Amino acid sequence: MRTTEYLAEIIKELERSAGQMSDAQAEQLADAIVRANKIFVAGAGRSGLMIRAFAMRLMHMGYATYVVGETVTPGLTQDDLLIIGSGSGETKSLASMAAKAKGIGAAVAAVTIFPESTIGGTADVVVRLPGAPKDKSDGAFGTIQPMGSLFEQTLLLFFDAVILRLMASQKIGSEAMFGQHANLE
Ligand SMILES: O=C([C@H](O)CO)[C@H](O)[C@H](O)COP(=O)(O)O
């Protein structure tokens, strides 16, 4: 296939994925974000890149948002929310982070392919997204893409949809958000 044909196939996969998501689960995540004092996000590898993009938009909206592991990230408290993006739901560092956050009394949200995973089972709010886990992308999960690519793309688009949902409910527009954007870049 040509590159543009692969791209068309990826877009078809994403359209199929969109039809498999739950609005009720998305609402639970949006509610948890609005209720939280501070929001922490965590993810490994490519899933981590996608959740960092989400953190930036939450910051643009005025939410106190931190990426776990950054030098300036403060401590988590019981009034806070930890959002983890993990396709497998089994990434060890994230599973232990979720357990620690629960021990502190914070709310934990997981966005994952597998709600029954270790991280999904620990979380208070679970959003299931379609996709193939990184070690089993053999066609059985309806994707031609390698490893966790479909999940990771879906994660980015899902988070952008959550941002639009929050912008509407909190009545915050793009111009106000741009006012929060980094001016030292
Ligand atoms: O980077 C990744 C890999 O490229 C899969 O496509 C994963 O996102 C990373 O290994 C984290 O895995 P999950 O926690 O299962 O998302």
Image (tube, helix red, strand yellow):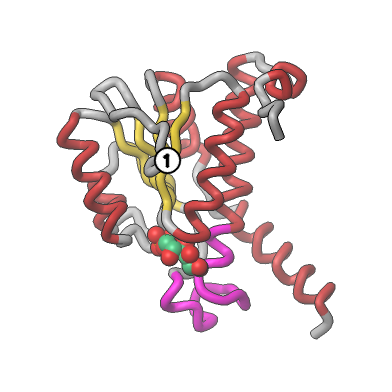
Quarter of the rendering containing residue 145 = bottom right
Q: Is residue 113 left or right of residue 96?
A: right
The vertical placement of 101 against 93, above or below, is above
Tell me the residue that label 1 is attached to. 70
Tally the marks.
1
Which quadrant of the frame does ligand 1 lie within?
bottom left
In the rendered image, residue 42 lying in the magenta stretch gets the answer: no
Report the span colored magenta. 134-152
Q: Residue at x 65, y 30 (%)?
A: 164
In which quadrant is the C terminus drawn?
A: top right
Between residue 21 and residue 32, name the one nearer to us: 32
Q: Residues within 10 Å of mark 1 (few under 14, many from 20)?
A: few
* Magenta-drawn stretch, dominant element (helix, strand or loop): loop
Q: Residue at x 42, y 56 (%)?
A: 44
Q: Residue at x 46, y 20 (%)?
A: 34
Quarter of the rendering containing residue 35 = top left
The vertical placement of 114 against 26, above or below, is below
Check mark 1 vs ligand 1: CB closer than 8 Å? yes or no. no
Visible in this render: residue 113?
A: no
Q: Position of residue 6 (x, y in %)?
A: 76, 75
| Element on which disc 1 rests | loop
The vertical placement of 138 against 47, above or below, is below
Q: Is residue 2 left or right of residue 92?
A: right
In which quadrant is the N terminus drawn?
A: bottom right
The vertical placement of 154 against 60, above or below, is below
Q: Position of residue 9 (x, y in %)?
A: 73, 71
Visible in this render: residue 59?
A: yes
Quarter of the rendering containing residue 16 = bottom right
Q: Amino acid at mark 1?
A: Glu
Q: Position of residue 178 (x, y in %)?
A: 73, 24
Q: Position of residue 120 (x, y in %)?
A: 30, 50
Q: Residue at x 57, y 66 (%)?
A: 149
